[in-house]
Amino acid sequence: MIISAYYSFISFNGPIGTVSLNTISLYILSLTVYFSLNVLLIWPYFFLADPKSVKNIVNGLIKKGILLESIISYASILTLSLVLTILLKEEHFFGLFLFTILSVLLALAFSKFFDLYRESEERANKDFLTNLYNHGYFKLKLDETFKTLEKNQVFTVALLDIDDFKKYNDQNGHLQGDELLRFIGQFLINKTKLTPYTPARYGGEEFAILFPAVTKDEASIFLNKIRKDFNDTPFDGADDLPLKCLSFSAGITEYEPGTYNSAELLNKADKALYYAKAQGKNNVQIYYEEADVYQNDLYLVKEIENLEQQLQIFLPKDVYTYQHSKRVFKYAMDFSKKLELSDHEKQTLILGALIHDIGKVEIPRDIINKKGKLDPHEWEIMKKHVLWGKEIVSTTKKYEELLPLVELHHERFDGKGYPSGLRGNNIPKLARILCLIDSFDAMTTERPYQPTKTFTEAFAELRRCAGTQFDPQYVEPFIEVIQEKFPALSKKERLEEESKRAAQ
């Protein structure tokens, strides 16, 4: 660049060693050559680094005024070079000293200017309370990702909402509520700082994360991991929340070909988030078109809403049973689609799954929340929940068909269950199915008095107990449904199991 600038100067008979206003145009020409070559030599780097983004970078330079700032910087170099030439000619070493002082002061001024520019730009993109990116920046980032997406590429969007934030605010005051928002902001920053993910405060107590080049199943695994970390993090006032810990619910959606725009993606993530809240909170849901399998059946929707209102009585006493019932209900919806059941049987199974543990409301609080193995007399009380549930449900005549599921979902195929010790096909079909679903969720859910099994371990237990505790004809179809709905989790656990066996 320097050599080219030199030869462009002398090719137009520019005098060497003298400074004159008559040759100022030649100086400008030389600097233009220098500037042009600089651009030509630097841009190949951007092209090689990310070919598809060159156009975006050029547009960004023009829109942000960086190109103009670059021209001003080069003009400053020209001015300084002329000043240096004059000072060296007239004052020699003193001139060089003055020029050095001037250059250092200008460099400091420019450095401060760029720092202020960067700070103001970050302030415009950041949420002042949580230090996360704000809603506007997240939308721009999402739109940019959507528009620059290449064929066969994927990305995922997640919306997170702090559970029971309004209750926390009401109990602890808005200042402490702001502290909770700051806390989750730093929590998300820490969890994503070593990843390419973009977390943002989407609004109020709602947050968003953009997962570039990540599938919905991978995003679900990540969010479930940090959700459990969030549950285990102590925070003032968290013990007074319904779930007795900090928690969030999340909805996930993955870009699919044919998606119209980013607003459609956010709408799907919002639906999944709403569904996660409806499943008892503190969980992550992936958006599926068919997730709400009963959306066109107005009768079933109404009955589910009625039964969900009854489930609310568990919240102040037994959060586990409330969440367990919601998960069993979801598994029953998924499994019912695979089984050869009539529409009426599907409805009965789904409603029975939702209300099957209603009798536990009669169990004393110290027994139902005991952290440890139950004593024999406590276990006898616990087993009575099926009979108490039958009494509660039988008070409403229209729910009579749910009675076998409520009363008999702990009967075993080998006749060793309770309360009646029924065997084999003497147990109603839907109760046999519900026994399988109920046991799977109990095995794979965190409980204070028993170790949690992975899905892989639970599958092995279901197969081991086929023909004794469970009707064998339903075991493999149920496992297939779970593997279809949670493919990434199942694969991850299989790999972990294989690694353990190889290590042994």
Image (cartoon, grey):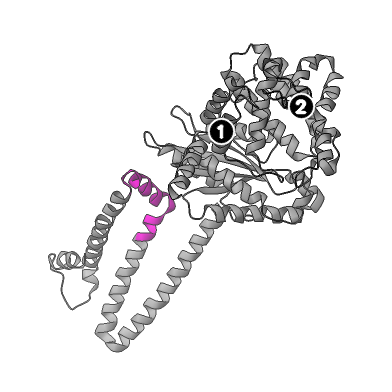
Front residue of this view, candidates 206 and 134: 206
Q: Is residue 259 left or right of residue 426?
A: left
- Front disc: 1 or 2: 2
Position of residue 18 relative to residue 63, above or below, is below
Residue 314 percent coordinates (x, y): 80, 36
Q: Which residues are magenta?
A: 50-70
Secondary structure mainly formed by the magenta segment: helix
Q: Is residue 146 magenta?
A: no
Q: Return the disc, 1 or 2, that comes first in the chain's sequence.
A: 2
Kindly indicate whether the residue at mark 2 contacts the one at mark 1 (C-beta within 8 angstroms): no
Q: Is residue 171 left or right of residue 474?
A: right
Q: Amino acid at mark 1?
A: Phe
Position of residue 272 relative to residue 232, above or below, is above
For mark 1, does the 10 Å Cα neighbourhood hold few (<14), some (14 to 19), or many (20 or more) residues?
many
Query: Which residue position is annotated with label 1?
Result: 459
**Residue at the (16%, 70%) spot, across then down:** 14
